[in-house]
């Protein structure tokens, strides 16, 4: 069967960090709890400023800002450590084949890299759309998640005509 669409992707360090940030930002707890906690701390800080307790008011507002900066910094640092620890993932090129009900992935030049005979069956892995955890879309990428923290990144600029609309159609 011929695929509806194909594309190729390379997971670079920059793409991996963006993938991680998108997944963290979209998770339910982080999406709700962080803004709520930050808002409460800022409101308390403003309340203290209005009461004339300027020191504690400024402290609380600064705490809210630093809390968000720290969360962003620690998430990026954790992503970079994971990237460094997983050499198999680094700059790996993969070709994706999209069908009506599933997609397949295949490492580019997998037979040449592994010493296999190119006439042997390919290293394709198939994933059904109905088994996906979810599909995230950002202005530049799609992140197709097979579980809460594992998935693939597809850059929109690498998509052939029609693939972007197709991926938007399978978003959950």
Image (tube, rainbow, N blue to C red):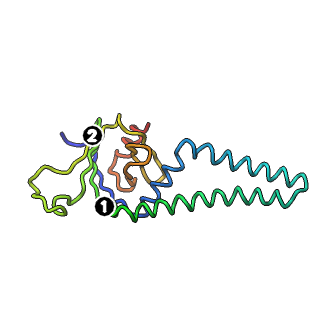
Q: Separation of disc 1 and disc 2 at Cα? A: 26 Å
Looking at the image, how many numbered discs can be counted on the residues?
2
User: Residue at horizontal 68%, vertical 47%?
Assistant: 37
* Residue that extends furthest to the right in the rendered view of this protein: 52
Residue 1 shown left or right of residue 36 in the figure: left
Quarter of the image holding residue 53?
A: bottom right
Packing grade of label 2 (10 A; few <14, some 14-19, many >=20) is some
Residue 2 percent coordinates (x, y): 20, 42
Residue 139 percent coordinates (x, y): 48, 52
Residue 32 percent coordinates (x, y): 61, 43
Q: Are marks 1 and 2 in contact (CB under 8 Å)?
A: no
Residue 163 percent coordinates (x, y): 34, 46
In this rendering, the label closer to the viewer, 1 or 2: 1
- The residue under label 1 is 88
User: Residue at horizontal 23%, vertical 58%?
Assistant: 108
Quadrant, the N terminus: top left
- The residue under label 2 is 99
Packing grade of label 1 (10 A; few <14, some 14-19, many >=20) is few
User: Residue at horizontal 8%, vertical 54%?
Assistant: 119
- Depth check: give the residue in front, 154 or 45: 45
Quadrant, the C terminus: top left
Residue 39 shown left or right of residue 138 in the figure: right
User: Residue at horizontal 35%, vertical 34%?
Assistant: 130
Residue 32 shown left or right of residue 158 in the figure: right
Q: In the structure shown, which secondary structural element does the residue marked by tag 1 occupy?
A: loop
């Amino acid at each position: 069967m011929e695929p509806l669409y194909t594309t190729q992707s390379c997971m670079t360090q920059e793409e991996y960090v963006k993938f991680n940030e998108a997944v963290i930002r979209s998770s339910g707890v982080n999406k709700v709890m962080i803004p709520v906690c930050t808002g409460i701390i800022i409101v308390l800080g403003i309340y203290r400023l209005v009461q004339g307790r300027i020191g504690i008011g400024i402290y609380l507002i600064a705490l809210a800002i630093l809390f968000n900066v720290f969360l962003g910094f620690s998430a990026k640092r954790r992503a970079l450590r994971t990237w460094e620890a997983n050499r198999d993932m680094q700059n790996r090129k993969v070709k994706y084949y999209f069908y009506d009900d599933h997609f397949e992935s295949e490492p580019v030049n997998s037979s040449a890299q592994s010493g296999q005979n190119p006439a042997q069956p390919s290293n394709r892995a198939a994933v059904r759309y109905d088994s996906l955890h979810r599909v995230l879309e950002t202005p530049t990428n799609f992140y197709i998640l097979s579980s809460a923290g594992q998935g693939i990144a597809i850059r929109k600029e690498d998509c052939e005509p029609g693939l972007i609309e197709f991926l938007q159609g399978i978003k959950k």
